[in-house]
Amino acid sequence: MAGSSLLTLLDDIATLLDDISVMGKVAAKKTASVLGDDLSLNAQQVSGVRANRELPVVWGVAKGSLLNKVILVPLALLISTFIPWAITPLLMLGGAYLCFEGMEKVVHSLTRHKDTDPEQARIQRLEALNSAEMQTYERNKIKGAIRTDFVLSAEVVTITLGIVAQAPLLNQILVLSGIALLVTVGVYGIVGVIVKLDDMGYWLVARKGQVAHILGRGLLALAPRLMRFLTIAGTLAMFLVGGGIVAHGIGPLHHLTEQWAAAGGAAGEMLIPLVVNMVVGAVCGGIIILLVEFIQRLRGGGDS
């Protein structure tokens, strides 16, 4: 009897692990596009600090990201169980915040003095900071990246929750926790490599051997171009992800986008949602920027 009970338990465990494996693969596939945006956003967000402080900043954001998911996984399960109608409005708020952040970066880029080299200006600004100011600057960078990560993590958790919604509670918890941990380790591991590409290049150039020199010079040439690309890609990702969340929450617009995409064939199915999400993200971010500016002017007028 005891032997058969043990075999039954082992069979149940094997079945559970098989179910979790299948659901985990589906969840990873569904969230892959979000992870690409997450990677470009966070690599761009943690750039702009002194070279010897890049990895500590990445580690600080990674810890904040893990805390985000520790909060989000049980919160998502509770909301899904008791107030499932609140998921979409909460995601739309987060999406609107991403649109606002993206438009803020665009406005800052357009209003920056054209005669100033942004990279050189950044280096001079960092060198001028004292120790206390540098710590404050790093904390602000980390907080900003963690806020952005919170919205992206919420979308990853929500997509995963939608896949495992009909599964037993234990399966939901294990799959959500597994995807959350995989996302955090994967994204910030790659971000850590990206921000240290230039240091790896200098290290290789200092080694003996022609191959090491060629690889080192290649990395040194690649690093600044990659960071510039990620700056642009990160901003676009804010519009795409934020606009996508907002557009998905507006029922008529979402259905209309699906109809346009279906009528456009294979290319339309890929491009039309991207264009709609980008436009919605830019419009949403622009409206919020104007509202924030209007409120700040009102406050300024009231104080004077």
Image (cartoon, rainbow, N blue to C red):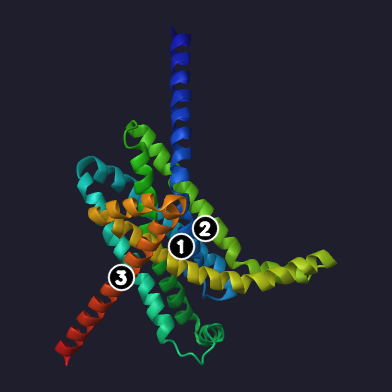
Q: Amino acid at mark 2?
A: Tyr
Q: Nearer the viewer, mark 1 or mark 2?
A: 2
Q: Residue at x 51, y 86 (%)?
A: 125
Image quadrant for the N terminus? top left
Which residue corresponds to mark 3? Answer: 283
Q: Is residue 55 visible?
A: yes
Query: Are the residues tagged 3 and 2 within 8 Å (C-beta)?
Result: no
| Front tag of 3 and 2 | 3
Q: Quadrant of residue 274?
A: bottom left
Q: Position of residue 222 (x, y in %)?
A: 65, 70
Element marked by disc 1: helix
Image position of 81 with respect to 263: above or below: above
- Sort mark 3 into few (<14), some (14-19) or many (20+) by Cα contacts within 10 Å: some
User: Dot 3: what SS?
Assistant: helix
Nearest the viewer among 99 and 48 is 99
- Of marks 3 and 2, which one's residue comes earlier in the chain? 2
Q: Could you say which disc has been placed on residue 188 in the image?
A: 2
Question: Rounded to the nearest whole Å, what is the CA distance between mark 1 and mark 2?
Answer: 8 Å
